Amino acid sequence: MSIFTKRGADAVSSATTEETTKDSILVPFGSGTTYKVRVKSVEDSAEYYAYGIFGKVNTFVPSNPSERNAKGFVTANHTVWDKAADLLYKDAKALKDAGKEAEAEKVSQQAYSFKGKPRYLMAFGNLETGEDIIVDLTKKQASGVMATINKYAKKIDKMAFELSKTGSSTSTVVTLSPIIDMDEDLTDAERDNFEKAGAQPFDFANFENCLFVADEEEQTKNLVVAGFDIGRLGLSIGSTSQADEEVTPIEDDPTADF
């Protein structure tokens, strides 16, 4: 099963591997970064579901991803992180039913932090080098970028853009702004690289080398780092689950978009 749930047009509307290992073309994209880019195609994006907790556990994707429905809710093959989230949601419901609203909200927020959340890899041609690059975006960030791409879709092959990130922590903003006068605002080298970047379509195999993939043992260790009691799942470090209990999918999120 691919780690990507949608790609191309499907990824945009929601906002091939090779035998030889290729170097990742995922580039650093911290706040304050700007790239001058060419949008090679409106199709060059891929959606995946990421797990991790900001400041505690680095973002990862499971080696054996969950099955999800069209709305992104897990329907089968729950990861240990999915199971941890669902247990905490049950705890929150029990607290709410007991009239402990404040405690319920706190546990619900904790449950949400364990859920897989959609993220997007997007590819562009880098006008500094003429080579392809990939950036990793949250759903909210990708939505804004995709909106701009769709707005200029009919003349995308004739326009250059600036891709920028501003803000800090979880409040960063990503913008894709058209460069109005390419003759004046681009150097000769950048204009040459604009043509170079458009010479070949993006190779989707490049997406496969961008993400950290964790098996169940690594995911379990990450749960411990995140502060979850893995004994509640019948787990211990170095062993697999002793009981694969049925999990009821959660059909709504109590917090805002990641």
Image (tube, grey):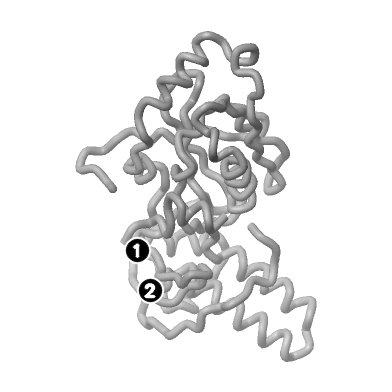
Q: CA distance from mark 1 to mark 2?
A: 8 Å
Query: Taking 254 as reference, is 28 above or below it?
Result: above
For this rendering, which residue is in front, 152 or 47?
Answer: 152
For this rendering, which residue is in front, 58 or 183?
Answer: 183
Q: Residue at x 46, y 38 (%)?
A: 41
How far across and how far down the image is residue 234, in percent? 42, 78
How far across and how far down the image is residue 10, in percent? 46, 56
How far across and how far down the image is residue 139, in percent? 59, 53
Query: Taking 215 as reference, is 78 above or below it?
Result: below
Q: Residue at x 63, y 82 (%)?
A: 91
Left or right of residue 33: residue 5: left
- Rate crowding at label 2 as few (under 14), some (14 to 19) or many (20 or more) other CA atoms within 10 Å: few
For this rendering, which residue is in front, 58 or 144?
Answer: 144
Location of the C terminus (image quadrant): bottom right
What residue occupies the far left of the structure in this picture? 19
Left or right of residue 210: residue 51: right
Q: Are marks 1 and 2 in contact (CB under 8 Å)?
A: yes
What residue occupies the far bottom of the structure in this picture? 98
Location of the N terminus (image quadrant): bottom left
Mark 1 sits on what residue? 64
For this rendering, which residue is in front, 252 or 79?
Answer: 252
- Rate crowding at label 1 as few (under 14), some (14 to 19) or many (20 or more) other CA atoms within 10 Å: some
Q: Residue at x 74, y 90 (%)?
A: 98
Return the mark for residue 77. Answer: 2
Return the mark for residue 199. Answer: none
Q: Amino acid at mark 2?
A: Asn
